Amino acid sequence: MLSRTADNLFWMARHIERAENTARVLDVAHRTSLLPLDIEGPEAYLWYAPLNITGCANGYELKHGLARGSTVNRYLALDPENPASIYNCLRLARENARAARGAITSEMWEVINATWLELNRVSRDLDNERFTDFFDWVKDRSHLFRGVTLGTIIKDIALSFIKLGTFLERADNTARILDVKYHILFSENNSVMSAADFYQWGALLKSVSAFEAYRKIYRDVITPIKVAEIMILRDDMPRSLHNCMNEVEAAIIDINGSSGREARRRAGEIHAALHFGRIEDVFEQGLHDYLTDFLNDASLLGQEIRDAYLSRRDYIISAPIKKQSQTQQIAFVN
């Protein structure tokens, strides 16, 4: 496969996954804003979480100033000047799909093209009260695209690059959500969890579709250490870091290019650390430091994948998360 075609498939999948992830983050931020908060500080502190997760805090502040729910929603969802907005993610996904038209099926193209056309229609009439429906629509279109992909495409190297982009993006997003939300919810609470805390942690689990899985596995109250465990180490949870790296490593092995030895080695190292890791060791190191190390490793893996298989574009795959403040940006993948 030509490196440019591989590049288009990889980034088509990443942008579709990124649009869904942004919709998930905004949806849980909106739902959380309706709940009572135990943390100190203004409401804006809550709305900096989605800005930090997506790395858009600096750009938002330059344009809008203090974080407010309605403006954060519109900036991250529909602003064409924001490179990380859902609007631009779906636009770039369609452009990459069109460039790789010969490597995807007609059904895949029809879904992604129809999504882009409908986005332009619904965005004109979208008001603040309908954003929740919009986020559900974005998630549904992403699910539809993945289902059509798995149901129609030949299981060859093209599918491997699609999976590689999907699960590398998903792992990056899961780590960022957990780090930012854990910082807000845990560091500000030093005593027994209140009812509000329960709903806050439940909202975090729902942002990665893990709430029902948590109740099925643990069958007890929600605790921070178990939330971290299900999102990091459980390989039977679809959006956990462990499961994502299962898929990333398998995709790289399937591609099996002679120039991808370093990418395979690093993917194997990351996967092994998750496969044999213990949540007690994660917390002994410090959850923030652990997730920062994971994101650094994922960034290096993305660069090695780019160098081995993809066109040499100036993409930034990831960047480390640093200590949080109300206005601090976390660099995001562009």
Image (cartoon, rainbow, N blue to C red):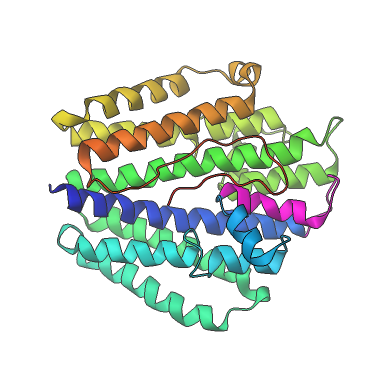
Q: Residue at x 67, y 56 (%)?
A: 29
- In this image, 272 relative to 108: left or right? right
Q: Is residue 295 above or below residue 71?
A: above
Q: Is residue 59 above or below residue 204?
A: below
Q: Residue at x 75, y 40 (%)?
A: 185
The x and y percentages for residue 208 are 56, 46
Can you see residue 178? Answer: yes
The x and y percentages for residue 283 are 64, 21
The x and y percentages for residue 282 are 59, 21
The quarter holding residue 211 reads top right
Tell which of 158 and 302 is nearer to you.
302
Span colored in magenta: 34-53
Q: Is residue 124 above or below residue 228?
A: below
Tag count: 0
- In this image, 316 relative to 224: left or right? left
Tell which of 268 and 305 is nearer to you.
305
Q: Residue at x 28, y 40 (%)?
A: 306
Can you see residue 141? Answer: no
The quarter holding residue 8 reads bottom left
- In this image, 232 relative to 197: left or right? left
- In this image, 96 relative to 269: left or right? left
- In the image, residue 83 lies in the stretch drawn in magenta: no
Q: Residue at x 45, y 75 (%)?
A: 119
The x and y percentages for residue 130 are 63, 74
